[in-house]
Image: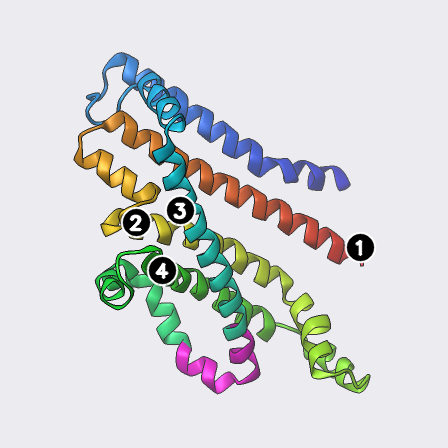
Amino acid sequence: MGRPARDSKWLGPVASIAILVAGAMSWWLGSSLGWWSEAVLPKPGDVWEALLQALGTEAFWMDARRTAVEVVLSFAGGSLLGLLLGVIFWKWQPIGRIFEPYLVSFYAVPLVLFYPIMIVLVGINLWSVVILATIMALIPMALNSWIGLSALKPVYLKLGRTLQVSRRQLLFEIALPGASPYILAGLRMAAVYALIGSVAMEFTTASAGLGFRIRYLYESFESAGMYAYVIVVLAASLLLTLVLAVFDRMLMGWRNES
């Protein structure tokens, strides 16, 4: 009975690798047979060469550092503020019901529309990107935290009150651990949205970052270089998702053992 569970742990990674390999093979085959123009999608070898050239330049690492700082700040700020909002909505349900439609509606609104406002308020700099990307990361974190805390069985909270634990202990030792599956899911979504938000804002009018470089190469008709940077962003997204998935499993394993 235990073997299928162990095998299922590897199903996702194996399937992801298989999809990547199939995509790479299709790309190579299509380029070799001339299914599309190289102006649309260059050959894998050309993109690989452009990637190696980019890795050897100082501009690439400056752009990568700029994007990394934006993602880290957005993720940290969005996660903390989202968790705080989730706790507030859980403790005071009427407030949550008032703000829930606005949070949900933000999923359908491209926050890049507010980028000109951020430029006016804080200028064309790192913080205009961080603020909007933080909001994007905040929304899934707040909703998932609120849902997880609301789904707690009342008996756990009643037991804590019966044992006369403090409010701090009730929150940090009972409520948050009980809602940890939802909170961890919110963290993973917040990380992805922080990356998406940062790159998307950079692509619009930022003066540095991976998103800015993609736009610059696109406007310069340097397709191979543009796709090289796109691959870097995709690799960063996959790495970020993998790290959070490993952290998720480690934390859930520790929680089950305890």
Q: Quadrant of residue 180?
A: bottom right
Q: Position of residue 28 (x, y in %)?
A: 35, 18
Q: What segment is highlighted magenta in the picture?
A: 86-99
- Residue 98 colored magenta? yes
Calculate the distance from the C-alpha at mark 3 to the C-alpha at mark 2. 8 Å
Mark found first going from the N terminus, 3 or 2: 3
Q: Position of residue 93 (x, y in %)?
A: 51, 84
Q: What is the crowding at mark 1: few (fewer than 14 residues within 10 Å), some, or many (at least 20)?
A: few
Q: Give the labeled residue for mark 1.
A: 257
Secondary structure found at label 3: helix
Calculate the distance from the C-alpha at mark 4 to the C-alpha at mark 2. 11 Å
Circle 3/circle 4 CB separation < 8 Å: no
- Residue 139 colored magenta? no
Q: What is the crowding at mark 3: few (fewer than 14 residues within 10 Å), some, or many (at least 20)?
A: many
Q: Give the labeled residue for mark 3.
A: 67
Circle 3/circle 1 CB separation < 8 Å: no
Mark found first going from the N terminus, 4 or 2: 4
Secondary structure found at label 4: helix
